[in-house]
Image (cartoon, rainbow, N blue to C red):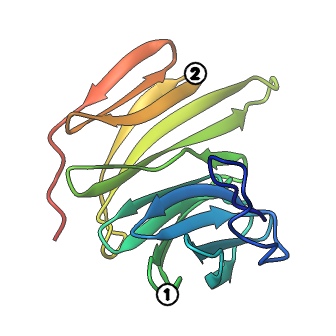
Amino acid sequence: LYLVDSSGKTEWPDSANIAPSIKHSQDGCLYAGDSESLLAMAEEDGTVKWQVDFPVVNDIVQVGDKLCATTRRDLIVVDAKTGERVWDYHAANEFATVSNPVVVDGVVACVTSSTFVDEEIYSFEQNILHIFDPTDGTELQSFELGVGDCYGLSAENESIVCSAGGELICIENFPTPA
């Protein structure tokens, strides 16, 4: 891993024998995922502060002192300073996927999309938006978003916006975490 400044000068030597994808940065720390772990690195020199085993990390967001990371089937929340696992949510369906997490109004949200196969081998997506308390993982609310592909989960002006089944959906007024 190398960090190169705007002049092309290498700022970090090959300080770690890793090839992470940097997903988030805050307060002088880079949070990254590779094929086997989630890690925190010092921005100034690339020193690995902590590293925990996870399957492939797709996305990372921060809420307070916690990082919320998604893998194919999980939402995992860790302490941003130590990497210690705080809680996780595992999609129950074997064919389910978990979207990128978003933070809005003090809660964490993600969409699970499940593919089902009926007797005629017909498959479809069932999309459910889950709203969690970031401190302990309590599911505060869930919304069925309908059937069809789900895209673009984002937080906009204290609302969650996404497209599901060809419709644009905006959800507001979330429960307050404990």
Q: Earlier in the sequence, mark 1 or mark 2?
A: 1
Tell which tag, 1 or 2, sits nearer the viewer. Answer: 1
Residue 79 lies in what quarter of the image?
bottom left
Front residue of this view, candidates 59 and 49: 49
Number of numbered markers = 2
Circle 1 SS class: loop
Check residue 82 in the rendering and tell me which mark sits there, or answer none. 1
Label 1 with label 2: CB-CB less than 8 Å: no
Locate the C terminus and report the quarter of the image it occupies.
bottom left
Residue on which the image places disc 2: 148
Circle 2 SS class: loop
Identity of the residue drawn at 67% across and 59% down: 57
The image shows residue 92 at horizontal and vertical percentages of: 60, 58
Relative height, residue 90 to residue 127 (above, below): below
Front residue of this view, candidates 70 and 1: 1
Name the kind of residue labelled 1 in the image: Thr
Locate the N terminus and report the quarter of the image it occupies.
bottom right
> Can you name the residue that lies furthest to the right here?
17
Tell me, yes or no, if residue 73 can be seen here: no
Front residue of this view, candidates 124 and 137: 137
The image shows residue 164 at horizontal and vertical percentages of: 48, 22
Rate crowding at label 1 as few (under 14), some (14 to 19) or many (20 or more) other CA atoms within 10 Å: some
The image shows residue 76 at horizontal and vertical percentages of: 53, 68
